[in-house]
Image (cartoon, rainbow, N blue to C red):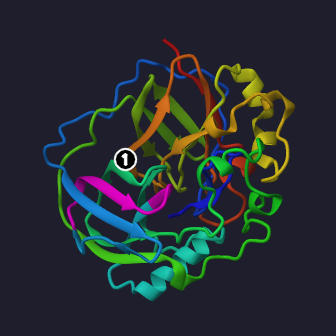
Amino acid sequence: MFRRVRRVGAVAAAVALVFTAACGSDDDTTASSTTTAAGGDTSGAGAVKVVVTKDGLTAPSELPGGAVEITIESDQEETEVDFTKVPDGTTEAQFRDAIAKAVSGEALPELLEFNVGVSGTTKSITETVILRPGQYFVWAEPASDDSPEGDEAASTTTSAAPSTTAAEGGEEEGEEPTKPEEFLVSAATVGEGTGELPETDGTITARDYSFDIEVKAGDKFTFVNDGPKQFHHAILLNFGSLDAKTVEDNLQAFLEAEGEGEGPAAFKDLDPSKVFIGGTGVNSPDGKGTFSASLETGNTYAAVCFINDRDGGPPHAFKYDMTKVFSVED
């Protein structure tokens, strides 16, 4: 995936950093609860199953285009699978070299033309994305040897995010870069297709470098990258009953904290196992799809983008403050 897993406190989970993209802040702290969902007739949607194990990735070599319901079966608790369109004739070796550079924070190779990602925190994930016709590679990063698991991981720390090195756009301190041959990759061709995304409980729209958020309480949402140039995703953090201003004032310190130790004092009463609540896959401009997360009325949340620019450099959350604090109201 265009995703480098990071701990968000002890969320037995991940704050993603990876591929390419940057995100920006917005002064409006309250999201509308009456958004019009992506909605539409999904009768033309195809269906695809992808199986991910520590040893490999299995996907059909022929995929439908248009609206496609993707089901991922994984032996990992957290998985992201990306569908990346490349120029005709691109070899697997060329592609592996390209994604290794992208994930490490280098400039995004031009052969990565279009991308939609499916991400989740369960061993079975089903989401719908829009795929364009063309040559693709379906891929995922290998599982990390030190991936947090279970309650033990959820009791470690309340601080947030990537190390200083990672925040500056490189690999996390002490982390070995993933080698091209280690990625889980399967070649595919996407044909023509129709259909629209299903109706959801709201939409998060990413731009260069900001979020527009129109959501109501629910568990299924739409993510759209309106670009126009950069890749983006949205990692969602739950700050419970804390007011939006407190979260805004402390969010950057929370994100910039080392993976060990205490976070901001204002967040000391947070339950770290409930901070990270999910996120989207990485989408290129014009990429769109659904994702799952639980948003509750009355809570304060933040959307954060940890993707780097096409030219490389620090993740958007750090370089451009691509974050958005929002509340879900009645």
The residue type indicated by label 1 comes to Gly
- Please report the residue visible at 47 percent of the width from the left and 27 percent of the height from the top: 214
Residue 77 on the magenta segment = yes
The residue identified by callout 1 is: 289
Q: Secondary structure at mark 1?
A: strand
Residue 28 rendering spot, x and y as whole percentages: 63, 23
Residue 163 on the magenta segment = no
- Please report the residue visible at 40 percent of the width from the left and 23 percent of the height from the top: 35
Label 1: how many Cα within 10 Å (few below 14, some 14–19, many 20+): many
| Front-lying residue, 177 or 287 | 177
173 sits to left or right of 274: right
- Please report the residue visible at 75 percent of the width from the left and 48 percent of the height from the top: 156
Q: Is residue 219 above or below residue 107?
A: above
- Please report the residue visible at 60 percent of the width from the left and 26 percent of the height from the top: 326
Residue 289 rendering spot, x and y as whole percentages: 37, 47
Q: Residue reaching furthest top?
A: 330
- When asked about the image quadrant of residue 255, the answer is top right
| Front-lying residue, 52 or 155 | 155
Q: Is residue 287 above or below residue 51?
A: above
> In terms of secondary structure, what is the magenta stretch mainly?
strand
Q: Is residue 81 above or below residue 327?
A: below
Residue 115 rendering spot, x and y as whole percentages: 42, 61
| Front-lying residue, 104 or 298 | 298
230 sits to left or right of 174: left
Chain part drawn in magenta: 63-80
290 sits to left or right of 78: left
